[in-house]
Structure formats: C-alpha cells, structure tokens
Amino acid sequence: MNIRRAFGGRAAGAAAIFATGAILLSACGGSGAGGAGSDATGSGASAQSGDASTGFSLAKGDTIGVAMPTQTSERWIADGNAVKEGLEKAGYKVDLQFANDDIPTQTQQVDQMITNGAKVLVLASIDGTALSSQLDKAAQAGIKVISYDRLIRDNKNVDYYVSFDNYKVGVAQGTALLRGMGIVDKDGKEVAGHPTGLNIELFAGSNDDNNSQFFFNGAMEALKPYIDNKTLVVKSGQTNFDQVATLRWQQDVAQKRMEDLITSTYGGGSGKIAGVLSPYDGISRGIITALQGAGYGKDIAAGLPIVTGQDAEIASVKLINDGVQSSTIFKDTRSLAEQTIKTVTALGEGKEPEINNTTDYDNGVKVVPSYLLEVKTIFKEDIESEIIGSGYWTADEVKAGVAAK
C-alpha cells in the first residue's frame, strides 16, 4: 500500500487533513467531544455528543466500522487506509475490513461491526442492494450510516452519502473521448471540420454498482448528439447499459468482451475502431490489451484507438504518459477521505454534517443527503501539474507505473 498517495506524499499533507479533524473535534469547547471538559478516557457525559431521541451518541474512543469492497484495486486499499488513519488521528478506533468483492463476506463483516458496537458505519458496498438487513440492524442499534462513494440503494437507513459528482464524471469521460478523437477541443467546443463516421464501442461499470448508471448516463449526454448525427457510430449496436456493463468492474471481463467485439463486429476488414468509452482504468487496461492483441498498434501514435478511464491508477497514468491510454478521470481520494472524516467528527460534536446536495441522489426510498466532490480530467499534458504536482503520484512512480512500497 502506498500511504504516501493516500495523504499527498508528505507529512505536512497528512497533518493538514488530520488537523481538520482535530479542529472539528475541539470546536465545541469544554462540553463537546474531545473538549477541555472531557476526562482523560473520554468517558462521561461531557465526552459524548449525540441525539438522545434516536439513541445515537459518539465519543472519542468509540469504534467506527469501515467496510471497503476489495483489495484487488489499489484505489480501495488507499481509500480504506486513508479513512482509517484520519479517523484514528481524530481520536476514534477503526475497524477496517476489505471484502475481496464477495458479497457474503461483506455482509458478515458489517454484521460483526454492528455486534462489536460500532457507532458509525462507513460503507463502500460491493452490491448497492445487498446490505439492507445490516442497515436495518444498524438503525435499530442507533448507528449512523455513511455511504462511501457508492450509493446504497433501496433502504431508508442511509444517513449520508459522500462521493464525487458521478454524473459529471460520466460527462467528463464522454467529453474526453470526443476530445481524444479530435471532435472537441480542450474547452469542450466543437472543432470545425472534425472527422465523422468514427466507430466507437461503449463499456460501463458493474450493474450492481449504483454509480455505474450515473457514469454511463453522464457519458451518453456528451456522446449521444454525435451518435445521432453520425459523427460517431456504435457499430456493434450495443448502446444499452445492460449490454455494456462489466460485472464487478473486472479487467479480464472487459478484455474478453473487447476481443469478442473485435471478432464479431470488426473482423474481415469491416472497419476499424476509433475510440472506446471506458469507465475505469482497470477496464481500460483490459480493453487496451485486447486491441493491441488484435493488431491495432502499441500506442495511439501507431493506431491504437482512444480509450478513456477513471481513478488515475498508477499503471494507467504511466500508459497515458507513454501515449497508450488517452485519458483518465482523477478523483482525489484524499479529499474523499477528508470529507468522510469531517462527516464523522461533525456527528461526534452533535452537529449536522456539511451537505451540498439534497436533490440528486435518490436511492429508491429516499433522497440521501450528500456531499459531492469535484473531479479533473487527466491527459498526458496534465500529469505533471495535477498528478505529480499534487503529490498523488511521484515522477518516479509514473515512470515505473508502480506505486512505491
């Protein structure tokens, strides 16, 4: 795990995040959680804050359960460790669990967190509908639930959602594909005399992840006008979300589908692929492997199609730097961890956490109060300023395509 990435690469960056939590904890003075009036152990009424009407209270030293979906993606390892370290610095105990993309494992882990007395659950679900009974148990126990990056669906017991603006992520991905193919410029304005009749194929995320539909719908907002006017042609005809979804976001699943598309739709000299909408860097690498294996060239300059991505994974940032992958969407998970820490510490003070969206994220039962973070699109020209300059990855890591240990 590259802890440096999770907290900006410098001790000062980590200190700034943790200081935020410390300020929040101390802001309520002598009577709040962690205030001057608390005793050394954090016990007693002066160390607790909460809503007596719901049975919720949170004090320094209480346990926060953090459930992450997998350790097969570097971003989830970074997320889990960033949240854990930040909450521990803010004075809480943390039970961090990774479920390795197995739904029964995650449900058991969350059940155990509830049994062990967690006061808040931070949940990045594998399947957005699979934790309903756990959420019901949490509500009965007076536990607050923060849905982390992936919105948990079809249950009223989701208290807060902390994520990026996922619809805008999709719009950015679609726009990046258009830019990579020379249809729009870096400001998103249509280029005069741009090429037309370009073949593209579409990939989406896992159909059990609520975010996937937001990504896809946002991307199609950008792409559909150009599909309608024949600038872009989805030659396979696969434009429906269910047709293009990639189960569990798996790289090998994406690679196999791309190989099948090349064989079934583009075999026998029946046209070339100009671009592929990919929602995630792991999927992108599977797509690129399939395209390279089919003779499309080793990089974009040699004829490889334009391929988008998401998450700024180090392997894909190297590919972008090397001219192989066209772009990725940079979701700075340090900011996501920081906002989650702010949400928990606000609850510890008995305050309402900061929210900036109360209209868009309906989980099928309720509109979940949300805090949405902004994202950035990364092309090769942006790596130095946005990725290396922010300390997310170092120049050496980008060159190697591997996170430093």
Image (cartoon, grey):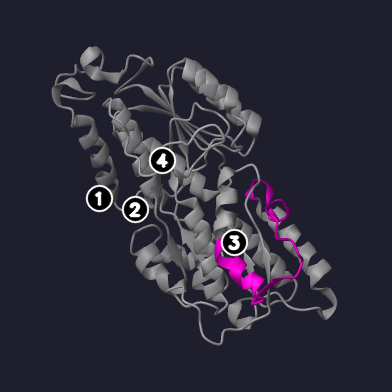
The numbered mark at residue 220 is 3
For the residue labelled by badge 4, is the local secondary structure a helix, a strand or a loop? loop
Q: Which residue is mark 2?
A: 8
Q: Position of residue 267 (x, y in %)?
A: 83, 74
The numbered mark at residue 12 is 1
Tell me which label, 4 or 3, sits earlier in the chain. 3
Please check the rendered image and state whether residue 229 is part of the magenta-colored stretch, yes or no. yes
For the residue labelled by badge 1, is the local secondary structure a helix, a strand or a loop? helix
Q: Amino acid at mark 1?
A: Ala
Other residues around mark 3 within 10 Å, as few (<14) / some (14–19) / many (≥20): many
- Above or below 144: residue 248: below
For this view, does 265 lie left or right of residue 317? Answer: right
Other residues around mark 2 within 10 Å, as few (<14) / some (14–19) / many (≥20): many
Other residues around mark 4 within 10 Å, as few (<14) / some (14–19) / many (≥20): few
Please check the rendered image and state whether residue 280 is part of the magenta-colored stretch, yes or no. no
For the residue labelled by badge 3, is the local secondary structure a helix, a strand or a loop? helix
Tell me which label, 2 or 3, sits earlier in the chain. 2
Q: Nearer the viewer, mark 1 or mark 3?
A: 3
Real-space CA distance between mark 2 and mark 3, rounded to the nearest whole angstrom: 33 Å
Q: Which residue is mark 4?
A: 358
Q: Residue at x 61, y 66 (%)?
A: 224
